Each structure stands twice: as C-alpha cells, then as structure tokens.
Image (cartoon, rainbow, N blue to C red):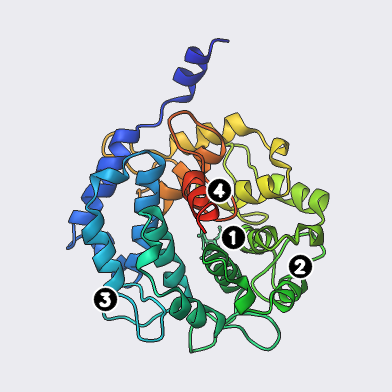
C-alpha cells in the first residue's frame, strides 16, 4: 500500500486548525474553559505553547507578553503559582520553567532561588510535597527531579533517597502508584519511570513486566486507557507511550491503530483534540494528542523528549549549554 493511501485512510492531522484553536482559546478570557482553568493557567500555557512549538508555530505568540506574565506568577519563595495572585505549587513551577525553556529564557531566572524552593519540598523519607500544605505524590518527585535536572543542580536534593522512595511505590504488576501501596496508574508510571530515567536508575524497573502491563492498556479502538477496565483517553497516548519508549518496549503496541484513534478525536472543523471521538475538545487533550503523535513519529511534528516532555531541540539546547 502506498503511503498516500495509508494516510488518507487514516485521516490527517489538521495542524493549522489546532494552532488556531490554541490561539483562540487564549483570547476567549470569558469562556467557560478559561474560567475553570484560571487557577491552573500556567499548566494550560505549557500545554498550549508546547503544542505550538511541536507544530513549529511558537513564533505566532508574543514571547515578551508570555514571559512577563510567567514572571508575575513567581513568589518570594522562588516557586510559581498557576496564575497571578495565586499560591505557589511545584506543579506550576515546572510548567513555568518549561515555558521559559521553550523561549530560551531560562537565563532570566534566579536559578538558585527556584531550585531552593523545589529542593525544600523534599521530605525525610525522600518523597516530595507539592507545596507547604504537604500532599505527597510521585508526581512531585518527578517534577522536582525534572526541574533540578534542567537547572543541572540535582545535587541540591538527596537523589538516592528520592529514588528509594519512588522504588517503594513499585507494585507487583511492575507499575507504580502515587504513594507506597497505591494502585498502578499510567500517569504515575510516567512520573516514576521519567524520574528514574533522568537520574540513570532505570535498572529498578522490571521492563518486561511493566512493558506487558503498559501494552495491555491498548483497547479495541486502538486508544489507550490508564489502568485496567477503564475507558481509553487520548492523554494516555502520552503517559503510556513515553513510558514504553523509556523502557524500550514501544514496539509492543499497534502504533497505526493508536495514530488512527488520536486522529479520530480531532474536531475537524474548529480544531482541538478531545479525550475520545466526538467529545468536546480542550487544551490538555490537544497537547497530549499532538505529543503522542510526535512520539509516534507522525510527519510534520517536531520530536519530543519522552522524559522531559519538551521538544528534543529544546532539551539539546539545555544540555549543550554550560
Ligand atoms: C510535564 C507531562 C508533564 C507532567 C508533569 C503532573 C504530572 C507531571 C503528571 C501527571 C500524571 C498523571 C497522574 C496523569 C493522569 C491524568 C489523568 C487523566 C487522571 C485521570 O484519572 P482518573 O482516575 O481517570 O479520573 P481514569 O482514566 O483512570 O478513569
């Protein structure tokens, strides 16, 4: 079969429409989506801007406007909030750092201050809290490790204890949960595998066992779910696929069927991608759909790094800059 007939059968990525959808979403400040996203605007900005960069359209937004807004969200503690006037949290701190990295603007940060905020959230047992209120989750371990690795100052935390804590969240099925004993979930698996990959500790993962659990997430429609008996959702194209790539088992899923599932979740008229076909689109699923297609090497999309969740060229720029 020629590649043309394959791609026409599978449908096409309507990249220009997704770009327009993201740019419009930012302008519609009074919309329902904007109002409910107000407190986590920093995450939304990371999802939208990274999608634009993956589609080679980051130049369509005003860098100065974005960067100065990001900096209004920084607190005295060094941490960033989800929006101006809100409280800082490690979740938004990583998004802020990622946005500045996209624009090659990490140099405007007081790295010592941001990294001290992140390192200060490590607990005695190696785990990380998300903010001063203390919730513990392996998401926060990943975020801390990702952030400090971008800053090249992992030595500010006890990496050995951080790794031990993550390993203590490993389950008999090979997966990982948010705390010791918690159920395996693809989102947490991404966090734990990502943190272990960044710190060079993937030998703690049983790759065949975890690879089997992850590839079993693919359902009949080609989409992936996040744990057994659940519905497929486009966002797991990221959480599952990135994990499979990091443990070198991505060839265990049917890539063509997953591409088709993601493309079937597009709004072909107004742009945007939804969780499942015919549902309402949003920025979160648009990002993870495009990021998933990037991991699947879909043409016209820049390559994304499976551990750092940033375009590969951005990560290379960081790694090769002193
Ligand atoms: C830089 C990409 C990146 C991430 C930062 C915040 C974070 C680190 C990771 C989040 C990982 C995670 C837990 C993802 C899952 C998100 C999700 C769709 C949760 C829904 O859970 P349920 O139980 O859905 O409502 P299911 O699909 O199980 O029914």
- Asked if the beta carbon under badge 1 is closer than 8 A to the nearest atom of ligand 1, the reply is yes
Q: Earlier in the sequence, mark 4 or mark 3?
A: 3
Is disc 1 in contact with disc 4, using a CB cutoff of under 8 Å? no
| Label 2–label 3 contact, CB within 8 A | no
Which is in the foreground here, disc 3 or disc 1?
Answer: 3
Residue 160 in percent (x, y) is at 74, 75
- Establish whether ligand 1 lies closer than 8 Å to the Cβ of label 3: no
Q: Nearer the viewer, residue 33 or 24?
A: 24
Question: Mark 4 = which residue?
Answer: 305
Disc 3 on helix, strand or loop? loop
Q: N-terminal of the two: label 3 or label 1?
A: 3
The image quadrant that residue 42 belongs to is: bottom left
Mark 1 — residue?
187
Label located before the other in sequence (2 or 3): 3
Report how far apart the C-alphas of labels 3 and 1 lie in the structure.
Answer: 28 Å
Q: CA distance from mark 4 to mark 3?
A: 29 Å
């Amino acid at each position: 079969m020629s590649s043309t007939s394959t791609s026409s059968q599978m449908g096409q990525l309507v990249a220009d429409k997704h770009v327009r959808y993201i740019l419009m979403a930012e302008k519609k400040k009074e919309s329902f989506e904007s109002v409910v996203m107000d407190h986590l605007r920093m995450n939304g900005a990371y999802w939208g801007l990274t999608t634009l960069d993956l589609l080679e359209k980051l130049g369509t937004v005003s860098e100065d406007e974005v960067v100065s807004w990001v900096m209004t969200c920084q607190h005295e503690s060094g941490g960033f909030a989800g929006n101006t006037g809100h409280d800082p949290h490690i979740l938004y701190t990583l998004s802020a750092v990622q946005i500045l990295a996209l624009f090659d603007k990490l140099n405007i940060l007081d790295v010592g201050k941001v990294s001290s905020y992140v390192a200060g959230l490590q607990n005695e047992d190696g785990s990380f809290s998300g903010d001063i209120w203390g919730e513990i989750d392996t998401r926060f371990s990943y975020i801390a490790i990702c952030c400090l690795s971008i800053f090249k100052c992992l030595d500010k935390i006890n990496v050995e204890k951080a790794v031990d804590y993550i390993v203590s969240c490993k389950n008999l099925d090979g997966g990982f949960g948010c705390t010791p004993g918690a159920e395996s979930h693809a989102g947490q698996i991404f966090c734990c595998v990502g943190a272990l990959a960044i710190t060079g500790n993937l030998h703690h993962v049983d790759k065949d066992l975890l690879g089997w659990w992850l590839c079993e997430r693919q359902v009949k429609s080609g989409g992936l779910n996040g744990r057994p008996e659940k519905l497929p959702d486009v966002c797991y194209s990221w959480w599952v696929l990135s994990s499979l790539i990091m443990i070198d088992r991505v060839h265990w899923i049917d890539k063509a069927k997953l591409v088709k599932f993601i493309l079937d979740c597009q709004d072909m008229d107004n742009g945007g991608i939804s969780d499942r076909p015919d549902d309402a689109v949003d920025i979160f699923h648009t990002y993870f759909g495009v990021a998933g297609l990037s991991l699947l090497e879909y043409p016209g999309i820049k390559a994304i790094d499976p551990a750092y969740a940033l375009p590969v060229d951005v990560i290379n720029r960081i790694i090769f800059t002193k």
